[in-house]
Image (cartoon, rainbow, N blue to C red):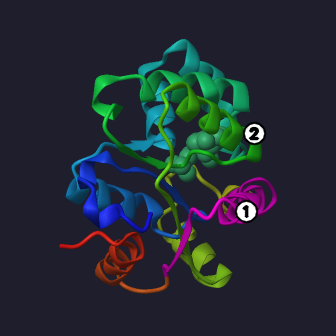
Amino acid sequence: MADASARPANGLRLVMLGPPGSGKGTQAEILAERLGIPAISTGEMLRRAVDSGSALGQRVESIMASGALVDDETMAEVVRERLSRDDASDGYLLDGYPRTLEQADTLAGILEDSSSALDAVIFVDAPEDELVRRALARQRADDTEQVVRHRQEVYREKTAPLIEYYEGLGLLRRVDGDRSIEEVNVGIREALGVSG
Ligand code: AMP
């Protein structure tokens, strides 16, 4: 990643990692727009599938409503198909994937198949109290506090191990998410070494 600023920014392949309520979705959209790469949110893709009433949507609706994770195999299909589209051929920012170590393995396989590699994993963190407060504040109409708390538990158990995994690969860039949207955004760009 040391040479990120020397490369065209639109060549970057990035992952945005962070607990529910960390603001990573907002940051993913701002950053992707700046870098001219698509922000790919698996949560958004699944919500659209639910809204459209597709077979996928019907399969995942109740799982999503409970705050649990959709199974790794289904997610592998969704992500493999999305990353094979033209607009993702020259970089992307994944938001909400991978969320398990198995998904990280799948992503590594997809990258290997296309002879590409991740440039960085941005980890946006904030204190747990603040996360629960924010997640409750922006909960969707049908989310109960129980669902919001369940999402935090699922994150701790299934997703948090990815922090160490990507740290071990030298890809992790930690950013303090307990600041204003603009400050976090600047922090992310500094961590990536992209100017502007
Ligand atoms: P999000 O908008 O990223 O919080 O995702 C909303 C919901 O979609 C999650 O609570 C999961 O039920 C499901 N989901 C999104 N991305 C994934 C993923 N990578 N693996 C499993 N489930 C996911």
Main SS class of the magenta portion in the image: helix
Asked if the stretch drawn in magenta spans residue 152, the answer is yes
Task: Return the residue at label 2.
Answer: 102
Q: Position of residue 43 (x, y in %)?
A: 51, 42
Which quadrant holds residue 71? top right
Q: Position of residue 173 (x, y in %)?
A: 52, 71
Q: Is mark 1 within 8 Å of ligand 1?
A: no
Task: Return the residue at label 1.
Answer: 160
Quarter holding the N terminus is: bottom left
Seen at 23% across and 73% down, the residue is 195
Is 105 left or right of 44, judged from the image as shown?
right
Q: Residues within 10 Å of mark 2 (few under 14, many from 20)?
A: some
Q: Secondary structure at mark 1?
A: loop
Asked if the stretch drawn in magenta spans residue 143, the answer is no
Q: Secondary structure at mark 2?
A: helix
| Residue stretch in magenta | 151-177
**Residue 146 appearing in the image:** no
| 129 is higher (above) or lower (below) than 146 | below
Q: Position of residue 76 (x, y in %)?
A: 62, 27
Seen at 71% across and 25% down, the residue is 73
Seen at 39% across and 69% down, the residue is 192
Q: Amino acid at mark 1?
A: Ala
Q: Residues within 10 Å of mark 1 (few under 14, many from 20)?
A: some
Seen at 44% across and 40% down, the residue is 44
Q: Is mark 2 within 8 Å of ligand 1?
A: no
Which quadrant holds residue 187? bottom left
Which quadrant holds residue 18? bottom right
Labels 1 and 2: the sequence-earlier one: 2
Per the rendering, the mark at residue 40 is none
- Which corner quadrant of the figure contains ligand 1? top right
Is 58 left or right of 11, judged from the image as shown?
right
Q: Nearer the viewer, residue 44 or 16?
A: 16
